[in-house]
Amino acid sequence: MKNYISALFSLLLVLGGFSSCSKSSSSSGNVSRATGWKINSKDGGFQFNSSFKEQATPPGTVFIEGGTFTKGKVQDDIMHDWNNSPTQQHVQSFYMDETEVTNKMYLEYLDWIKAVYPPEDPKYTNIYKGAVPDTLVWRNRLGFNEALTNTYLRHPAYAEYPVVGVNWVQAAQYSEWRTDRVNELLLTKEGYLTEDALYAAYNGDVQGAFSTEAYINNPESVYGGAIDSLQGKLKKDSTSVFAKRSSGVFTPEYRLPTETEWEYAAQALIGTREYNNYRGRKKYPWEGDYTRSGQRVGRGDQLANFKQGKGDYGGIAGWSDDGADITTEVQSYKPNDFGLYDMAGNVSEWVADVYRPIVDDEISDFNYYRGNIFMKKAIGEDGKVKVLRDSVVYDTLANGRIVAVNLPGEIKMVPVGADETYLRTNFDRSDNRGFRDGDAGSSRFYERFSDDENNRKMYDSPDHKVERDSTGKLLRNYDKSNYRTSLIDDEVRVYKGGSWRDRAYWLDPAQRRYLPQYMATDDIGFRCAVSRVGSKSKTKNKTVRHKKRTR
């Protein structure tokens, strides 16, 4: 009997050892669980970043853990807009700028453009001009604001003030530029590029700048084809080594936040959480029904920069309620429970969405966003993606302003076609901005719709046209039709949050307004967001309540 028990015990030990070895080898990350082959073998084969742990927080941003919340109004609809009815939505985790983009941050962008694409060169002139904010937004027919017109953008006194006079198109293009600069720096730190690469285009040493998508899809085209001379320490002898998306080096793109992301981040309901419930809703980004501080230190001070009343933008001399009359420095007030500053007041902010009065939660209640235009990379005859070597693609906005759509060194993008949409169920076209709310199928004249029946569109907005005559002179043709019934179209964008010009009603994160994407004002700025890849949370530890932030 003893021999039997001893033999059985030995067998269990052996089996346990095999199980342990199997588990260890399969979970090490360097052996394929599909084939058993080695991954990252020095002899070649499949190479993959098996040591990737966690997405690094992109520069300037804070982590916003996603979740479910009620998007929409919590106050009476005194404006009778009926455009923010409550709807339950879920937001994926993401990162958002801690503050609005400041004048100094935007001037860095302008400085780079001016150096890489000198406006003295006729083919580049409109790149720089199209990126410069409209400083004339400060002018008022019955107001003296010339000092702001001349100094607000560039004077050091306003360096940490939010940039204004930026239209939606400019804000989106700034986000693209920021993506490339951040990824260029990451490649330098990881040894794929030399430090000289950061300033090669800036100093005019190469023809063409770094583009993230061009590097990933056609790396030999980057820096005007001179990337081989800018390879970093990872280069092996004469063999170039390029990072791939699977390398885990690149940060996802900087972009404008969606309206749902912005509202979720502004509310910061995580501060009212107890276990897995929200204890009520919030009227403002802070807790409470009032705009003044109830804390012992600073009791009675305003918690945001907004208009106090008619002719009152900041109180009286010696006792300013909010410390500002126009905009003020970012981080002048306490952050919300996500660590975000100025989500109410200072300036309103552009978000990515095309405006519609109704949020169509029947179609989507996850990462809701209206504005999708699905594109694909253009492929050349050689089978590689097309990179615009030294050409610039321009677009003329409705107000006559010329902006660059594609810069030299970027990939040419084209709309998806039948090859991508045939027999699909999730989308059937490239442009989905008017899906179920503005397209032909959503009009009561569906099946009787034709191009010459412009008055039968669902949103019959003015159709201003800008053309050039044979001499190159710009012709602005205003739509003077008496049959227009709406200002809504596919180029009208949402902006959120109150500003220094607004009363407290607009500080509610649920409030929404809209403006054509080519227009700019002295009270609208923006901040960027970055998608999170991987896990929803940064930690698996759960707490009863959210830990309050302190400045």
Image (cartoon, rainbow, N blue to C red):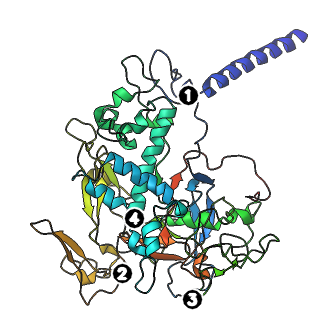
| Mark closer to the observer (3, 4) | 4
Q: Residues within 10 Å of mark 4 (few under 14, many from 20)?
A: many
Determine which residue is flagged by label 1: 33
Amino acid beneath label 2: Leu
| Mark closer to the observer (1, 3) | 3
Label 1 to label 3, Cα distance in Å? 60 Å
Helix, strand or loop at disc 4? loop
Sequence-first disc among 3 and 4: 3
Determine which residue is flagged by label 4: 133
- Vertical placement of 510 versus 227: above or below? below
Q: Residues within 10 Å of mark 2 (few under 14, many from 20)?
A: some
Nearer to us in this view, 346 or 405: 346
Helix, strand or loop at disc 1? loop
Amino acid beneath label 1: Arg
Give me the residue at 37% from left, 63% from top: 169
Determine which residue is flagged by label 3: 78
Q: Position of residue 62 (x, y in %)?
A: 61, 53
- Name the image quarter holding residue 229: top left
| Mark closer to the observer (2, 4) | 4
Q: Residues within 10 Å of mark 1 (few under 14, many from 20)?
A: few
- Is there CB contact under 8 Å for labels 1 and 2? no
Nearer to us in this view, 331 or 513: 331
